[in-house]
Image (cartoon, rainbow, N blue to C red):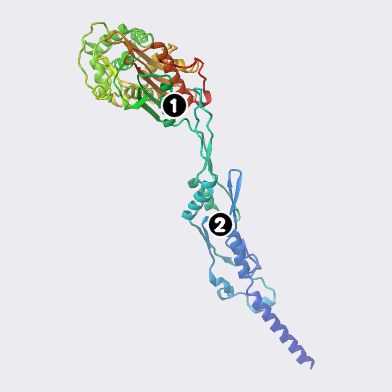
Amino acid sequence: MISLGLILAAGGLVLYAGRQFHHFQKILPLNSRWGVVNVGGLSVEEARQQVMAVYLGPVELMYQNDKIHVSAEELGFHLNLPDQLQNLQTDNPGLPFWAYLWNKPQPPADLPVEVWLDETQLRAYLQDEIANRYDISSVPPLPIPGSSQFSAGVSGRYLDIEASLPRFQRLLKDPMSRRVELIVNEHAASFVENDLLKAVLITELREANFDGIAEIYAYHLTENQELHFAVDHGQEVAADIAFSAASTIKIPILLTALMQMETPLPDEFIQLAERMMVFSENPPADQIMNTYIGSTLAPLKVSEVLQEVGFKNTFLAGYFYLGAPLLQRFETPANQRADINLNPDVYNQTTGGDMGHLLRAIYSCAESNQGVWVENFAGKLTSEKCTFVLEMMLRNRIGVLGQAGLPEGVPYAHKHGWSEESDGLLHTISDVGIVFGPQADYVLVIFLYDPVQLLFEPANALMARLSQRIFNAWNPNFQVEWNFGKVQYR
């Protein structure tokens, strides 16, 4: 009886152990890993939930100081866990029963995880739910009523989606990390927009009651922003009007002469250039053409150079001395316009656009030995020679016109021009140059024309006011206030 009892007890223990063994087979071995998750000692279903909690758990997005919590699935993360792992014992022979009874360790399992990211879905989420809600547009400076200044702009910010995408890819390899620092870029307050600046300048002309024709060309040399327009009696008209060039034509005279010369430049030439560009004397201009460009047709050589570079509306048809013969009558797109004819000087003409592009080309030549002057006259015009032109123009410190509107000490390489015309009266005044501002270098070209008679003092104040407006718009951190009273042309 005792033996039979022992046998029955042993059989019962074996049956109990068998049931425990069957349950044990559904438990993942110690130190088992499913992807990066330690799932040892868990059932398959428990392990599945743990893996999903890690790989598809909420992600914390950081938009600068803002925290946004979002589910991984909304971001486009997808996880594939094979169904056959529900019955792990069918795929794994498990531990022999007798080994289980003797408490022998089961080898750990290493289970695969398939996880991927749908970047199309991620981009859409970042744009629709993050960028559209958290991005802030910059606000450009705006004109201050009754002042020549502009209000300070407000900087903005924007989510750089493409630059942020690789940071989400890292979660595929390191799912334990649930924070993503989004890349947010600052969008600095832009300078005054072109249309607004043009409207401001046209308003200045109207409020000054300027009833003539004005053409303005300005070019931001850092941002490559171009402003070019013309106004007739306060109403905008097509630009590129033919004006008398007067002394502004001395800029291409100097360039053409430099093309014929080698450096170092002779002292005599430097002295003549100074008298022509700084003191705006006409005899030195004639002497430079006669001596260094050569022959009685030297003015036409200047025009030929201009035409070759592409300045179709600018020419010089004779010397400056009184009674100089007209060497050629030029017809240009500008002076053949039927809508506007200012009866410009037949000896020398230009437009705001031609002068603006000419100055841009000089700047490129001087700064980087590039541009149309270098491309068309390789070896003849170099950075050194173009720098010499700018140095001469920088020494032209007359303190009026465009320079009068600039802050004290701001370098302004320019050439001004005015002269009596065929009726003995002054009709056109101009100032063309390059402002080397503390924030921005820019080209500045202003032509003013009065069909009756140009009044110098109010025209001078008006040009200074226009110049200051452009400076303040493009150098917002260094603005100056107008201190010369109300500008009234008539």
How many marks on residues?
2
Residue 150 or 219: which is nearer the viewer?
150
Q: In what quadrant of the picture does the N terminus appear?
A: bottom right
Task: Tell me the SS state at disc 1.
Answer: helix
Numbered mark located on residue 384 in the image? none
Q: Label 1, on which residue?
A: 200
Q: Label 2, on which residue?
A: 72
Q: Is residue 395 visible?
A: no
| N-term-proximal mark, 2 vs 1 | 2
Whole-number angstrom distance, CA of label 2 to CA of label 1: 51 Å
Residue type for callout 1: Val
Residue 36 vertical position relative to residue 8 in the rendered view, above or below:
above
Residue 201 vertical position relative to residue 248 in the rendered view, above or below:
below
Residue 256 vertical position relative to residue 23 in the rendered view, above or below:
above
Residue 398 or 295: which is nearer the viewer?
398
In the displayed structure, does residue 399 sit left or right of residue 477?
Answer: left
In the displayed structure, does residue 14 sit left or right of residue 168?
Answer: right
Return the x and y of residue 125 as percentages of the image width and height: 51, 52
